Image (cartoon, rainbow, N blue to C red):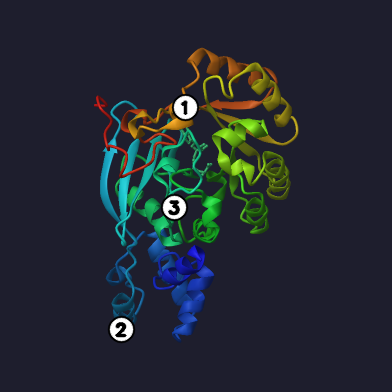
Amino acid sequence: MIEEKEILREFKTLKGLTLSELRDFFISISEPKFRAEQVFKWMYGNLSDDFTEMRNIPKSLREKLSASFNLNTLEYSTSEVSPSTKTKKYIFKTNDSFKIESVVIPEQKRTTLCISTQVGCPLDCKFCATGLMGYKKNLSAGEIFDQYKLANQNYIDSEITNIVYMGMGEPLLNFHATVKSLRIFDEELTAKINLKRITVSTVGIPTKINELARTGLNVKLALSLHSCFEDIRNRIMPINKKYSLAENIEAIKNYSKKTNTKITFEYVMLDGINDRDEDIKALVKLCSTLPCKVNIIPFNSLEHMNPGGFAATLKPSPINRIENFADKLKEKNITVMLRNTQGDDIAAACGQLAYPETPFLRKGAL
Ligand code: SAH
């Protein structure tokens, strides 16, 4: 139902159409096919939303297009930079007045943009702020792309080199728009970001992982693992009761083989829940069965959201346990990245994206 509505909405705008859809569009209005390449390059390569700038398009056609289409799917609302890490959090507003968040994370050798695929999220993972705000709607492919456009236009220190689909929402539950946005990034006319530098992160929806493998896009895949045990995963990520870890492992093995890519396991360190010796043992065993790396993430507090029940009891693992966990994996020759808590001081770190419920600036942050 949701998807059908979204598709109809998308076809009312050109922003979000893939190159082949844009060709169909121009053919349908009896224009030459090459107009598609021209408009595509303006929208996604030059990041232009203004038909009057598209000088290689005849004026009469530009006027016709601008009378029918608004290419601007998001409006820049505010942004905030963490003084310590330079991580920048943006609030963008959709044309139907929802607010979404994107984050730019500058590092030494790269600058990563973290984008949202839904307003809110239906998954209710117990450690995640977005889950606490619930699900509002799917973003269109245009709205997904325009986060990249607006971040570029409002981020001038360095160029965005990488994109992670790790903002608000579950990309594989908004499969149609997510894949369309990847197809747009995949075109040479678009930009400088190759799909090898794009990672889609999922809680694990096996049928959709298989479907993503069949698209031939070869984008990198991250699985939010967080525990190797079904019962623990059931507790912290209720969706696991529907799509078990076992089914997901089978799907990601297939994905890795088909796309010839390494899978990234994301692992948020929760005190006493997934940071025990038996967790290390199970993770080492899992890692021996497929090409992968492990991204260890310190748990970012949700205290600004005042969660209740089980969520309120979750605490970050102490730093020495996190380091020991990482060392034990490294000893077994597993590639481990210990993610720092970039942006923690502005509530922009992973799992803290929950505007408008999130106070924009946490107390004492600056
Ligand atoms: N729905 C997708 C993408 C969004 S979450 C997914 O689940 O993968 C992106 C990453 O942030 C995931 O690995 C998620 O588990 C992690 N995350 C969520 N809440 C967090 C928190 N409070 N602290 C640290 N990481 C968190």
Give whichever of 92, 87 is nearer the camera: 92
Identify the residue under disc 2.
60
Q: Position of residue 257 (x, y in %)?
A: 73, 46
> From the viewer's perspective, is residue 100 above or below residue 317?
below
Q: Residues within 10 Å of mark 3 (few under 14, many from 20)?
A: many
**Left or right: where does residue 301 sit relative to residue 255?**
left
Question: Where 135 sits versus 128, above or below?
Answer: below
- Which type of secondary structure does the marked residue at label 1 adopt? loop
Residue that appears at 28% across and 30% down? 362
Amino acid identity at mark 3: Gln
Q: Is residue 155 visible?
A: no
The residue sitting at the bottom extreme is: 30
Asked if residue 114 lies left or right of residue 220, the reply is: left
User: Dot 2 surroundings within 10 Å: few (below 14), some, or many (20 or more)?
Assistant: few
Amino acid type shown at disc 2: Ser
| Pair 3/2: label in front | 3
The answer as to whether callout 3 falls within 8 Å of ligand 1 is no
Q: Secondary structure at mark 2?
A: helix
Q: Amino acid at mark 1?
A: Phe
Q: Which residue is mark 1?
A: 299
The residue carrying mark 1 has its beta carbon less than 8 Å from ligand 1: yes
Which badge, 1 or 3, comes first in the chain's sequence? 3
The mark that comes first in sequence, 2 or 1, is 2
Give residue 118's mark: 3
**Residue, far top:** 320
Q: Quadrant of residue 334?
A: top right
Looking at the image, tell me whether mark 3 or mark 2 is earlier in sequence order. 2
Q: Position of residue 190 (x, y in %)?
A: 46, 59
Cα separation between marks 2 and 1? 55 Å
How far apart marks 3 and 2 lie (CA) works out to 37 Å
Residue that appears at 25% across and 50% down: 77
From the viewer's side, name the closer residue of 69 and 271. Answer: 271
